Amino acid sequence: MDDQPLRLSIKYHCNTADTRQSGLMFKPPLKDNECAFFSFPYSNHLSFWNKNVNFDIVVIFVDEDFNIKDKKILKAHQTHPVSCNIPCKYAIEILAENFGKISEFNKAHHAGDMIELMKKNAKSKNFGNEDFQKIANSYYKSIR
């Protein structure tokens, strides 16, 4: 593996009831550097499944203070949900096979090297690059 961290960009920003409900269903597999970012209007005990998704994913649960609280694996087409026991406001879905690459972020020199936001795919009044960077920084600290 090279020294460069995997940079994630938001392919799907799920910030409405409809987009959160459909998530990655019937979508082509994410590329190595892509994620689905779920933002909710308030913190709650979030639950996810992988129905009608033909690839394995990792769900990263993030609270309203941008602290990562839990990570769960969902197998392709898994209908049994996974959840976080701590109320969270955000979730990030990535390819399960990339989780090991993301764990390599501890080799990064700056937390800012880890994750970059692609604004064109994540336009929202309630969410911006600064918010996403707080999550990146939290993750960086959690693996150091």
Image (spheres, rainbow, N blue to C red):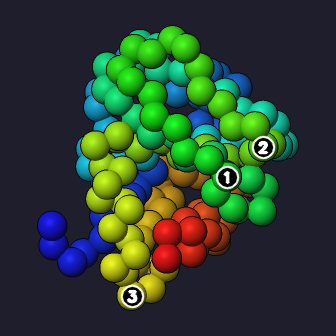
Q: Where is residue 43 in the image (x, y as percent from the top left)?
A: 82, 43
Q: Position of residue 86 (x, y in %)?
A: 78, 43
Cα separation between marks 3 and 2: 30 Å
Residue under numbered circle 3: 109
Q: Where is residue 103 in the image (x, y as percent from the top left)?
A: 38, 62
Answer few, some or many: residues within 10 Å of disc 1's Cα (few below 14, many 20 plus, some between 14 and 19). Answer: some
Whether tag 3 and tag 2 are in contact, CB under 8 A, the answer is no
Whether tag 3 and tag 1 are in contact, CB under 8 A, the answer is no
User: Under tag 2, what secondary structure?
Assistant: loop
| For discs 3 and 2, the disc positioned in front in the rendered view | 2
Q: What residue type is disc 1 on? A: Lys
User: Under tag 3, what secondary structure?
Assistant: loop
Location of the N terminus by quadrant is: bottom left
Whether tag 2 and tag 1 are in contact, CB under 8 A, the answer is yes
Q: What residue type is disc 2 on? A: Ile
User: Under tag 1, what secondary structure?
Assistant: strand
Q: What residue type is disc 3 on? A: His
Q: Residue 69 carries which label?
A: 1
Residue 107 horizontal side relative to residue 112, left or right: left
Cα separation between marks 3 and 1: 23 Å
Residue under numbered circle 2: 86
Residue 140 horizontal side relative to residue 107, left or right: right
